[in-house]
Amino acid sequence: MYSFRNDYSEGAHPCVMAALAETNMVQTPGYGTDSYCEETRDLIRKKCAVPNADVHFLVGGTQVNLVSCAAFLRPFEAVISPCTGHPLIHETGALEATGHMVIPVLSENGKLDPERVRALCACHSGEHMVRPRMVYISNSTEIGTAYTKEELVALHNVCKVLDLYLYLDGARLGNGMVTDDSPLTWEDLGETLDAFTIGGTKNGLLFGEALVITNDALKADFRFHMKQRGAILAKGRLLGIQFKAILKDDLYLENAKHANRLAQQMQDGIEALGYSFLIKTPTNQIFPIFPNTLLEKLSAMYAYEIHKPIDAEHTCIRLVTSWATPKDVIPRFLEDLKHLTHQ
Amino acid sequence: MYSFRNDYSEGAHPCVMAALAETNMVQTPGYGTDSYCEETRDLIRKKCAVPNADVHFLVGGTQVNLVSCAAFLRPFEAVISPCTGHPLIHETGALEATGHMVIPVLSENGKLDPERVRALCACHSGEHMVRPRMVYISNSTEIGTAYTKEELVALHNVCKVLDLYLYLDGARLGNGMVTDDSPLTWEDLGETLDAFTIGGTKNGLLFGEALVITNDALKADFRFHMKQRGAILAKGRLLGIQFKAILKDDLYLENAKHANRLAQQMQDGIEALGYSFLIKTPTNQIFPIFPNTLLEKLSAMYAYEIHKPIDAEHTCIRLVTSWATPKDVIPRFLEDLKHLTHQ
Amino acid sequence: MYSFRNDYSEGAHPCVMAALAETNMVQTPGYGTDSYCEETRDLIRKKCAVPNADVHFLVGGTQVNLVSCAAFLRPFEAVISPCTGHPLIHETGALEATGHMVIPVLSENGKLDPERVRALCACHSGEHMVRPRMVYISNSTEIGTAYTKEELVALHNVCKVLDLYLYLDGARLGNGMVTDDSPLTWEDLGETLDAFTIGGTKNGLLFGEALVITNDALKADFRFHMKQRGAILAKGRLLGIQFKAILKDDLYLENAKHANRLAQQMQDGIEALGYSFLIKTPTNQIFPIFPNTLLEKLSAMYAYEIHKPIDAEHTCIRLVTSWATPKDVIPRFLEDLKHLTHQ
Amino acid sequence: MYSFRNDYSEGAHPCVMAALAETNMVQTPGYGTDSYCEETRDLIRKKCAVPNADVHFLVGGTQVNLVSCAAFLRPFEAVISPCTGHPLIHETGALEATGHMVIPVLSENGKLDPERVRALCACHSGEHMVRPRMVYISNSTEIGTAYTKEELVALHNVCKVLDLYLYLDGARLGNGMVTDDSPLTWEDLGETLDAFTIGGTKNGLLFGEALVITNDALKADFRFHMKQRGAILAKGRLLGIQFKAILKDDLYLENAKHANRLAQQMQDGIEALGYSFLIKTPTNQIFPIFPNTLLEKLSAMYAYEIHKPIDAEHTCIRLVTSWATPKDVIPRFLEDLKHLTHQ
């Protein structure tokens, strides 16, 4: 049974596996102080055109979010997040466990906009309230939408005015960058964000998120924070080697394009069969709404996650493609869906 | 200039001051292990008809909320609060600083209802999400409304079903108990709540909140938690003596009645002059809406807090009465308001 | 039965009670923003000759220690404390609960010396270890000893060199300042310390510790930290009024002198009867060693705390005097002890 | 230049790499819920003869220590550790960052003994002190020593009496188990410990520590704690696959034997050349003391870590072997050392 459950169902891209195998018996210093990591940091700095950015390699997404929150904020400072943001929904209170409030802002499309950030900050003042300090966004978002460059610039501007840090969780960064209608460049990220992550786990690595810190004010002592939260990998080279393998020839964006293309093909095909969506998305996650009767049969043929019930007879599911999804799976899925539809 | 800013503008009720003066040179053991505290604990247990309740005396409201949260919950467990709840708005992230998420639930009247608690819990499951465990309510609420017995019982029932603790912040407990339409008894509290506080600071004490824990599961080691958060007063007797002074002859409820009565008189008078309210309340906090032009003049005569702007020309203010408000201040205020209205 | 158990067995000095009574019905703003607090802050700044010091009033000693630690340090920064320090022994892990390691340094006399601070820092480096950042000392210490000016200056100097903050817990500050052999002035404190507390609870107030921050780097946003830890008193004026009462005419130091004098008289008398001490101290806490057989009888006549067993037949006890100890109690105690000794 | 710096200088054992390569494109559910993890859990339960043990796979050592501490303890409960313990020295305050005090106990050989545990607990009581609750030990220890079965049983017994949990950090578990003089079996661990880790990172895996919880009281909700601390790996299968590869045919103990054998050979050879040691150890870490003049030359030929200076002319260094150390490196090193010695 083929699984569209997520984009981390397999191991790593063959190129990544090859790089790990090749370097396996080389001796290096630990904790990310090796030359593979150093090279890869340089590569990332160049891509983003931020020559003095700090780059750290961490293992997972929740981990990088919580270490960043602990490092960037004073205890009474808070994070602003769209109400669908990962830290509010799927991190078991990881940011709160570092002592920080995460303030939800209503969002219909998974994105934050400057107006709502401004409104929220306007009603915070004085020592009886937390001080909003960091804006958390993700791209692509938890519901598959993506920011345009104009939207990022607008958020960047409002953050500067309000003395907020703009942090982008890039667990699915590639998918958010290579959309057909509003692609982003690495330089766009370097210019608009105080810090952002380049997600490896969901785009071809065994594991790994690279954190890029462009704002000097956020750089000091970050490795102390990492170590304190158990987030420095002993064999740190594994992160440097993997990211190098996927970034050096733009495999990172290629993988994302592949995933987006297949998901879009699937979205178009589903729409053509007359189904609607919770929201139409331009990335590798799509959210079709199907009759429960159909899902009973579909679930015997494909694995997927239930996103949420819509009404007594319909449910929204999530279908996810990745670098690992074979091209021929999509037409087969659409064919199967057509059959089930016309039964 | 008379201040309606809050109910903690003065020192303590004369009876409380007298009790402190009388006992001043008596030697007692520290940290609330003295006989005054012990007597007062018994008094409270009797009033609430929970003979084996644990009673602790703490200094302030944010303090008692944060210690309770730290003591009652495991790290991944969360608090459910109406979106207007004190911990979400006016405690500078004190509960989050103990590591816990506080989940806001939409509320128009400052109260929680079972339906919304149930809906919130229904969408929480599994280790990727926090586990809602404690329901935070306040009575009277932050916007002056009060729970009926039926409402408390309904919340109690839903909490039992969903394995939630029901915690009531009684910073203004007296005011919430002695409303004309839906008075609550001490026994009502003992029967429906897992833990609740009896607020002294806003009802005649120099300071002090008594925490009553009725649920056996929440009792263990509470004093360790208090000490760890800096919440055991060295001269703990001060809390026992003050609470005894105000509870032994029901001065506590008398003070609250006085405050409610004056606020209601003021609310009626303001309404009679044709003004509207953000919400009509039965307690000692009222929320009239006035033209900004009128407020310019009123603010030179009386002190109050601005609750929030309504539109370009109108503002909602908060007027608070207390045990200390002289009876004759209200007619004078209404007279002054009438003048300003007809100018 | 007279109690030498501690210096917080009674209420407050009569002058303090009078000040509270006089101001009781005055209306003021809350949270320490009133004019009493403001005046008292000025008074303290002048005494210490640090015109731009920040002064905050908190309720208790553990509270002020934990808020300071949370405010002054980044998460990976640690406190250095003598192994007998209050945070290590009697605060139930309050500093660790804010996330910070407290590193014990061996100390025989309750004090820290520069050599040991230097040695400890010498073996800390890199992100795999905490970074020592704040030196915690108390004066008088937990075992009744006191710092000389030279010792404070020496610690101050080593802290400057090693980029450490020097924090003095003054729960018994008066007693540590007015010793016969090495008195300290308020200016001495202002000159040598980055922050220190003026303990009220143990020297005549109902409760209260004033925190004086002289180092500009430690001042920002302190009230946010206070609020977040439940450490802003609603009726903050109570702290301003009490501290003013005791500081304006130097009653603070007079109270401490009274206590020290009586304790020294008692220490001399006990020594004259042939008893030894765990350590001889110049303040209001003394630590005589008595035969257990004698203590059986003494404990029926006086209350005190057991400090620790010395051997199978002897125990060290702690006797504490205070502003409230009547002068005639000491000769009576010595007379009684003489009797018990010669029985 | 060959490096004896540590046992995590290379990638993974070839068998582990092969297992990862073979399974790379298989689709599995995430977060350790796959069948590889499930099988490996069973394998571990069988080895340890604790059929109902809970087994969790985490990425790193500091991570597993901090999650365990957060999960097993209430906020006021503390960890007892030998003064050389990893959490006290090399985890940047990770346990304190979860809010818990770690109490150092003097230890000359890196191990804890029952007498000192008992003495420490004897002086803790009441709510003004933390409550010691978890005993942290490591095997092999941070200075290369190892526990005998008798020592583990004795600690187990004292922990039962004092209501303490016994937790063993097995970052180098294999090396501690296969010593010549006092080997331990998997069953020994299952019988004496409330929880322990099986370290993979230092014994042939790319990364990974397996946590085995044998005490029912510590099992509840552990995955919530893992997630909250960022310690659930998305592609959790990587841990199951790697541990299976190394545990199924006892490669785990073989690797450790290889490492110990080479280190012992080196220790004997160094001793034969007339050098002394900080402490003689039976595992894969040895601590010879060399003249600084010799080290100047040695450091050009081999990489190692400086453990600590001994006097003005001598330094103790650490030499570590591992599964990856080629057999012929040791005679070469000894030959080189002989040369340098006789120059």
Image: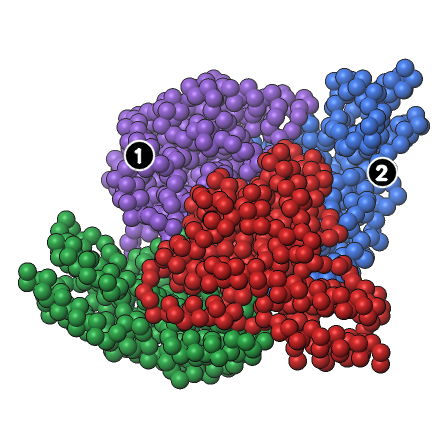
Chain colours: A purple, B green, C red, D blue
User: Which dot marks residue D222?
Assistant: none
Q: CA distance from mark 2 to mark 1?
A: 60 Å
Disc 1 element: helix
> How many neighbours does mark 2 have within 10 angstroms: few (below 14), some (14-19), or many (20 or more)?
some
- Percent coordinates x, y for residue D263 in the rendering: 83, 31
Residue C340 picture quarter: bottom right
Residue lying at 33% horizontally and 24% vertically, measured from the top left: A183
User: Which dot marks residue D279?
Assistant: 2
Q: Nearer the viewer, residue C80 or D182?
A: C80
Dot in front, 2 or 1: 1
- Is residue C39 shown left or right of residue B309? right
> How many neighbours does mark 1 have within 10 angstroms: few (below 14), some (14-19), or many (20 or more)?
few
Disc 2 element: loop
Residue lying at 78% horizontally and 39% vertically, measured from the top left: D143
Residue lying at 70% horizontally and 58% vertically, measured from the top left: C282
- Kind of residue indicated by mark 2: Ile
| Chain containing the residue with disc 2 | D
| Chain containing the residue with disc 1 | A
Mark 1, residue position: A161
For the C terminus of chain A, the quadrant is top left
- Percent coordinates x, y for residue B82 in the rendering: 34, 60
- Is residue A30 shown left or right of residue D152? left
Q: Nearer the viewer, residue D209 or D106?
A: D106
- Is residue C273 shown left or right of residue B336? right
- Kind of residue indicated by mark 1: Val
Q: Residue furthest left?
A: B342
Residue B259 picture quarter: bottom left
From this viewpoint, is residue D215 visible? no
- Is residue A1 shown left or right of residue C311? left
From this viewpoint, is residue D106 visible? yes
Tell me if residue B288 comes above or below residue A9 in the rendering.
below
